[in-house]
Amino acid sequence: MKLSSPKTIAALLALAVAGAFSAHAADKKVVVGFSQIGAESGWRSANTDSIKSEAAKRGIDLKFADAQQKQENQIKALRSFIAQNVDVIAFSPVVETGWEPVMKEIKKAGIPVILSDRAVKVTDPSLYVTFIGSDFVEEGRRAGNWLAKATGGKAVIAELVGTPGSAPAIDRKKGFEEAISKFPGMKIVKSQSGDFTRAKGKEVMESFLKSPDAKEITALFAHNDDMALGAIQALEEAGVKPGKDMQIVSIDGIKSAFEAMAAGKLNCTVECNPLIGPQLFDAVNAVLAGKTLPKRTAVQEGVYEQSQAAAELPNRKY
Ligand code: GYE
């Protein structure tokens, strides 16, 4: 065979291309686009840290976008991930609805989607591979059951709701209401959104305290710790003793909630684990390896009271 024959040249070229390609494939990093909701709470910051540090540990090229609690920003980020042709898209949807069009675009581009932390409402379940997150209805139930036990089934309750339309706000309310419905002496008399932030939690609690029937309130259910912590500040400023004059239960289990419990100001926190980075990237690898994943992966979590706070504090990782 003559070295200069067209056939030989074509064969050599093919070899060179294949070699270059496989070398590229070997050092090519997995690229994951992640659209985060924002930085609204201690939970969220811990969640972001978990995702970023796990990606770094595994050598994954993470394109991280913060949506500042706005769905339109998340949709923009998702479209930019399509344009960048990332290997996998993951996101934590701020609200449940309105995702179908952009998720169809992602599917058309052939990019697998993993939902992290919050769920979406879509008619076509093939628009995502798996949802990794907590059971928010169960968390609401746990908060309601704890309050029923602590108050002997008698409580006039104020509720600080999470972001309107978000899965945790909808589901936690549902679970809590279901649990307290078994107790005729328990009723919610005030319910308003504090958008999962400390500042809004404080503001809404201040407005609750200004209402003529404020003195009747004996308990507070906050959909997350940050809002409860804001409310605690409002109560203290108004001369009401949080944790004593008013029983307070919230959800997440962040370190500052344990500190507030140890100080006797918060009564109970229901755990919602934000450290889902490792599970998320396990799912990314499984998807890229062509494995089938369960449609839903739950996160393990518990319920903690004041009496456990001091012992548990040193163990808290978020
Ligand atoms: O409880 C809250 C955060 O989606 C579970 O979002 C999450 C919630 C969490 O802002 O603190």
Image (spheres, rainbow, N blue to C red):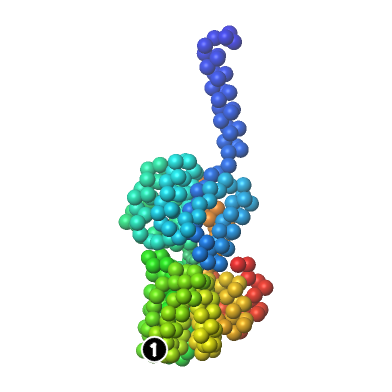
In this rendering, is residue 219 above or below 278?
below
Along the line of sight, which residue is nearer the eye, 204 or 173?
204
Tell which residue pokes out farthest to the left in this image: 123
Q: Position of residue 190 (x, y in %)?
A: 39, 81
Which residue corresponds to the image point at 37% horizontal and 84% vertical from the top-left?
A: 189
Instruction: Categorize mark 1 by other alpha carbons within 10 Å: few (<14), some (14-19), many (20+).
Output: few
Along the line of sight, which residue is nearer the eye, 296 or 268?
268
Q: Quick one: quadrant of the N terminus?
A: top right
Which residue corresponds to the image point at 47% horizontal and 41% vertical from the top-left?
A: 85
Along the line of sight, which residue is nearer the eye, 222 or 32?
222
Q: Is residue 172 left or right of residue 28?
A: left
Q: How many numbered marks, from 0 up? A: 1
Q: Quick one: quadrant of the C terminus?
A: bottom right
Which residue corresponds to the image point at 57% horizontal and 9% vertical from the top-left?
A: 4
Three-letter residue code for mark 1: Asp
Q: Would you say residue 259 is visible in this rendering? A: yes
Which residue corresponds to the image point at 37% horizontal and 65% vertical from the top-left?
A: 165
Q: Position of residue 19 (x, y in %)?
A: 59, 27
Q: Is mark 1 within 8 Å of ligand 1?
A: no
In this rendering, is residue 98 above or below 272?
above
Q: Would you say residue 142 is visible in this rendering? A: no
Query: For mark 1, what is the residue?
Result: 213
Label 1: state its secondary structure. loop
Along the line of sight, which residue is nearer the eye, 172 or 132?
172
Q: Is residue 208 left or right of residue 286?
A: left
Q: Position of residue 244 (x, y in %)?
A: 54, 89
Q: Position of residue 122 (x, y in %)?
A: 34, 57
